[in-house]
Image (cartoon, grey):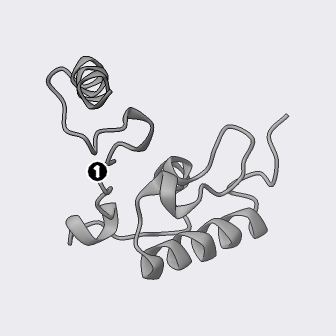
Amino acid sequence: MADNKKNRKNNRNNNMDDDFNPKFRKVRKKVCPLCSDKNFELDFKNAEQLKKFINDKGKILPRRATGACAKHQREITLAVKRARHIAILPYTQD
């Protein structure tokens, strides 16, 4: 009986670790685009720059999608909202 369990275990994980689970693989953490480039200045008047941080419907992308740190995500949000208020960016896309 013990030999049977051992054989099943060996058949299941031929060349992989016992802890391997493809469902829970490690994802590489994104680097903040504003922290990595010191010359990158976020400006609410530059619509092309802000379009990187909004989706096709005009919604602001979350941190997990943009890879921005908390400090810069707040700045991105503020810049997008200011651009929307002065009609540089639309509130929604049709």
Q: Position of residue 62 (x, y in %)?
A: 58, 60
Residue behind mark 1: 28
Q: Where is residue 3 in the image (x, y as percent from the top left)?
A: 23, 25
Left or right: residue 49 compared with residue 22: right
Q: Is mark 1 on a helix, strand or loop?
A: loop
* 67, above or below 57, in the image: below
Query: For the point 41% across and 44% down, which residue is it?
Result: 24
Q: How many discs mark residues in the rendered view?
A: 1
Left or right: residue 82 compared with residue 53: right
Query: For the point 41% across and 59% down, which residue is it?
Result: 67
Q: Position of residue 4 (x, y in %)?
A: 30, 22
Left or right: residue 1 compared with residue 86: left
Q: Which residue lies furthest to the bottom in this view?
A: 71
Residue nearer the viewer, 25 or 33: 25
Residue nearer the viewer, 61 or 11: 11
Where's the N terminus, which quadrant? top left
- State the image quarter where residue 16 is shown: top left
Left or right: residue 70 compared with residue 74: left
